[in-house]
Image: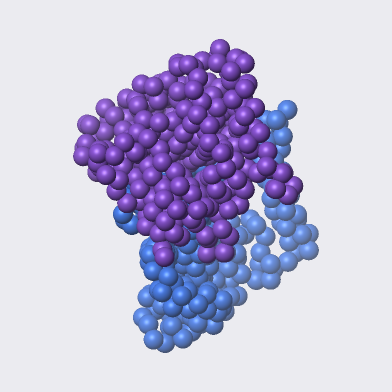
Amino acid sequence: MAGQASSELDAGSPLAVSLRGVTKIYDSGVAALGPVDLDVKRGEFVSLVGPSGCGKSTALRLIAGLAAPTAGTVGVSRLAAEMRGHHPIGFVFQEPTLMPWASVRENVRLPLKLAHAPTGEADARIDEALAQVGLAEFARAYPRELSGGMKMRVSLARALVTDPDILLMDEPFAALDEITRFRLNNDLLALWRKLHKTVIFVTHSVFESVYLSQRVIVMTARPGRIGAEFHVSATEPRGEEFRTSAEYAAFCRQVSNALAPAYAGHAGA
Amino acid sequence: MKSSLHAVRLLLPVVVFAAAILLWEAIVRINDIQPYVLPGPVAVFETLISDWPVLSQSLGVTLLTTLEGFVAAAIGGIVLALLFNQSKWLEYSLFPYAVILQVTPVIAIAPLLLIYLQQQTAVVVCAWIVAFFPVLSNTTLGLNSVDRNLAGLFQLYGATRLQTLAYLKLPAALPFILGGLRIAGGLSLIGAVVAEIAAGTAGAGSGLAFRIAESGYRLNIPRMFAALFLLSVAGIVIYGLLALISHLVLRRWHESALGKES
């Protein structure tokens, strides 16, 4: 049975994303994912953690509709955003994935241009998105003139510019230095509190996942399945104090312990 | 230190050129070689001045042919690459013939073309045959070099084929296309010259290559050299112009046009 690429979830449903029995087997015969059942509530911040090759990026691509599942159903709540005339999903890749020939402003404009949004409205939304990530002054710069962290912010602004309900992030800060990553983590949390988006965040960093999320999902190695699930019930809002607290360390230890078997079965890890 | 090294790099070829010219003139004078055997550079330069009316007119003819061949090659190469990119069937059906056209020596095709086409058309077609392939293959390479994640992004936002082509594939392919055009510029001059020589032996034409052939029959060696000099200068100018255009178009973003330090 062939799976279905992102069907619509019930408008009244409290869920933003719902995976049911989803598997993905690539044409090469590699079983990348599943079967996986996963529900993500509206406004929830969920992290997927696991060893490389555990299918966490594949899961994001399936939710985004960039690939179709081999079996199972992917349900995504698109209607609310589409009713406002907005694109329901924003995607941030591991690389900044910017167009090198276009300025920061034109890069952020891309989703609106593809949707034929009127110029005046688009300009206002681009200004807003750039301000949200703190890049208002760099609108005219070209990607090569920016640092790695700033490029990632542009990528984030581009994902936010359509005011999506769901933000999918595929190891977005993995290539950045630690200080820059911490700052982007904090800014992302602040944005999430302000904008109430549903965020699904893929990372291989236990510390990052615990710091950011309400729920951490640990995945096992190929084919990726859900191995364990943790609710990070820390006090909000989180900040640098939380990062150095015993509570944070305890959560990290729990997640690390759950992750260990996945790595043990992983040759060369 | 760095700027002096730069100056040396520019100066050395000039010094070599001047030395070669001097040596050439000296050999001709010391051995008293006749101009119909080997003219000295001074004699060549004098011929360039005295025969300028004839030579400049021929230069104009050759340059026009080259330009027509180049424009046809640029349009043909890019359009064909776009069609191939949109339809695999078309690519599989036609690409082998593009290769065949490229690997068959144009000097062997030229006499045939001259039989079936008007001379002016045949010359332009020759220039096109030689020049279009690098544009085609470079554009194809460029269109296929699009960042996979960027392509995914366009897919995510529901871009149409035309949008993907205009906003993603063509800009991504631009450096490759410009590289292909740079090669095509020089090649279309070669194609024009080859066809002119083939046509010239058939007794018609007035381009620079025809002048060279004609002067050869008349043992007017200084004029051969003068015409050859003009062809060489034309080639250098064409390359320089295309390199400049490429630099100006890409300077804001592409690695090839950026300084090493940035």
**In the image, which lettered chain appears purple?**
A
Protein image colouring = by chain
Q: Position of residue A212 (x, y in %)?
A: 50, 26
Quarter of the image for residue A108 reads: top left
Q: Is residue B96 left or right of residue A248?
A: left
Q: Is residue A136 above or below residue B48?
A: above
Residue sitting at 61 percent across and 32 percent down?
Answer: A255
Q: Position of residue B209 (x, y in %)?
A: 51, 70
Q: Is residue B117 above or below residue A90?
A: below
Q: Is residue B100 above or below residue A123?
A: below
Residue sitting at 45 percent across and 17 percent down?
Answer: A236
**In the image, which lettered chain appears blue?**
B
Q: Position of residue A269 (x, y in %)?
A: 72, 44
Nearer to the camera, A137 or A130: A130
| Residue A242 appears in the rendering | yes
Q: Position of residue A262 (x, y in %)?
A: 65, 44
Nearer to the camera, A54 or B213: A54
Residue sitting at 26 percent across and 33 percent down?
Answer: A122
Give the mark count: 0
| Residue B260 appears in the rendering | no
Q: Is residue A78 left or right of residue B48?
A: left
Q: Is residue B189 left or right of residue B122?
A: right
